[in-house]
Amino acid sequence: MNSKVTAVLLISLLLGCKGTGIEPGEVAAMTKGYLFIDNFGNYCSRGGLVTLIDGDSYLAINSVPTEYEGFSTAPLPVWIRYEREKLDTCYIEPNRINILSIRKRE
């Protein structure tokens, strides 16, 4: 009986020890929706995926997989790798990013 209890405890411990699924360089984020075009910005504005990272909103200016684009993009917890877009005369806003990888959080 004692060995059965030990075996059950070992199995439940092993099954419960899942990792978070995070990979190096990834951060937790939440998609907020997809902005199709920013007509009220400067002459070179464009749309993109709006993402919430550590309480701040960022606009992804590169293309992302189609499941994250469009009107049906609901808030979704994701893991992303990103880099900040370099500031230039066209984009003076600091919250523009290039998403290097994106995947749903489980």
Image (cartoon, helix red, strand yellow):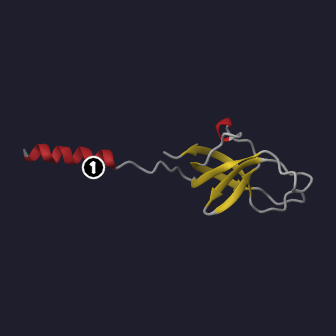
Residue under the point 80% across and 62% down:
93
> What is the three-letter code of the residue carrying label 1?
Leu
In-image side of 61 versus 45 (left or right): left
Place of residue 18 in the rendered image (x, y in percent of width and height, measured from the top left): 38, 48
Residue placed farthest to the right in the image?
43
The front one of 89 and 58 is 58
User: Hey, which quadrant is residue 86 in on the image?
Assistant: bottom right
The front one of 70 and 99 is 70
The residue singled out by tag 1 in the image is 13
The front one of 75 and 24 is 75
Residue under the point 59% across and 54% down:
29
Residue under the point 74% across and 60% down:
95
User: Hey, which quadrant is residue 71 in on the image?
Assistant: top right
Residue under the point 92% across and 53% down:
43
Q: How many marks?
A: 1
In-image side of 22 versus 96 (left or right): left
Q: Give the crowd class for mark 1: few <14, some 14-19, many >=20 residues within 10 Å.
A: few
